[in-house]
Structure formats: structure tokens, C-alpha cells
Image (cartoon, rainbow, N blue to C red):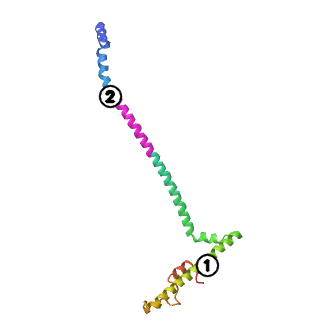
Amino acid sequence: MTEELDTLLSYIEKDGGFRDACMTLQQRPLSVLEGDLQNLLELLQVFKNKVEEQCSKAEDLRNKMFQVSARQAYMKGILTQSSDTQYWDIWNRQNLSPEFEAKRQNILKANQNLTNQLVELERHFNNLEMNKFGETGRVASSRRAVYSNKSRSRYSPTISVEYPNAFC
């Protein structure tokens, strides 16, 4: 029996035997499988690069979102602070250096002067309108009463609300 097994083993191992037949049958599918794996590896590399690029873009967007959120919180704080009367009371009570206090007073005076000039200019325009309509006679008598010399500017209520010292 050993001789038979040795003979069988020699047939399997010899050139063109069972071993070669098995290897030949497996080489083609194996090379196809290797080629498919290579193609899959290349596709995976392409997709990996795309995913990394998208992750980078997502991280950039997240960083920009954080910057916008931080700026929004900062602006909200400024808005809250600017609308807080207690803050402005404290700000107005601060002792400024004489140089800055003089500049502040100059700004307040300039603001008051500009407001007064705006009121006077509006009165002048109203008088011009009244004279124009008064000369041509196109205005009804009920409307002339609205444009009397004693009447205020048509925008003066708004100005007096915004600038309470404008008519003092």
C-alpha cells in the first residue's frame, strides 16, 4: 500500500499532474481577483481623498460658524450694553480728563447747534411752502390754517422727541 501511495503522490507532484492542474485552474480566477482588488483599492483611495476633503471643508465651516457665533454674542452684548440706561448713566458720570471733557462738550454743543439749524431750516422750508401756496391761491382756506406762521415744522414733533432741548 505504501507503494500505491507513493505512486499516487508522484502522479500528483509530477509536471502536468493533479497539482499543476489545480494550480492552473486557480491562477486565472486568482489573477482576476487580484486585478479587482487593485481596482477596489484605487477606488477606495479616491473616495478616501474625497472624504478627507469634505471633512476639511466641514471643519472650516464649523470654525467659521464658531466665529460667527462669537461675533453674534459680542454684538448682542454691545447692543444690550448700549440699550442699558444704567450703563449710560455710569458712562455719563465718569470723570474724563479735562481734554476729553472739553471735546465732549464741543461735540454736545455742535450737536445742539446742528439740531437748531435743522429746525430753523425746516421752518424756512415751511415758510417757503406757505408763501408759494399763499401767492398762487391753490390751497384751500382750511389748509392755510395749518400753515400759519405760528405753526411748528411738520417734522418738529419728531425732532423734539429725538432732541428734547431743540426748542429750548
- Residue 20, x across and y down, in percent: 31, 17
Name the quarter where the N terminus is drawn.
top left
Residue 132 in view, yes or no: yes
Amino acid found under the numbered disc labelled 1 = Asn
* Vertical placement of residue 86 versus 142, above or below: above
- What span is colored magenta in the figure? 32-54
Instruction: Identify the residue at the far bottom of this view.
Output: 141
Please tell me the numbered disc located at residue 63.
Answer: none
Where disc 1 sits, the SS reads helix
Where disc 2 sits, the SS reads helix
Horizontal arrangement in the rendering, residue 105 relative to residue 42 (left or right): right
- 25 inside magenta stretch: no
* Vertical placement of residue 50 versus 108, above or below: above
Name the quarter where the C terminus is drawn.
bottom right
- Mark 1–mark 2 CB contact (< 8 Å): no
Residue at 49 percent across and 86 percent down: it is: 129
Name the residue carrying label 1: 113
- Residue 3, x across and y down, in percent: 30, 6
* Vertical placement of residue 34 versus 113, above or below: above
Amino acid found under the numbered disc labelled 2 = Val
Q: Count residues near mark 1 (Cα–Cα under 10 Å), then give few for <14, some for 14-19, many for 20+.
A: few
Residue at 71 percent across and 70 percent down: it is: 98
Q: Earlier in the sequence, mark 1 or mark 2?
A: 2
- 44 inside magenta stretch: yes
Residue at 41 percent across and 37 percent down: it is: 45
Q: Nearer the viewer, residue 145 or 56?
A: 145
Residue 4, quarter of picture? top left
Foreground: disc 1 or disc 2: 1
Name the residue carrying label 2: 32
- Residue 23, x across and y down, in percent: 32, 20
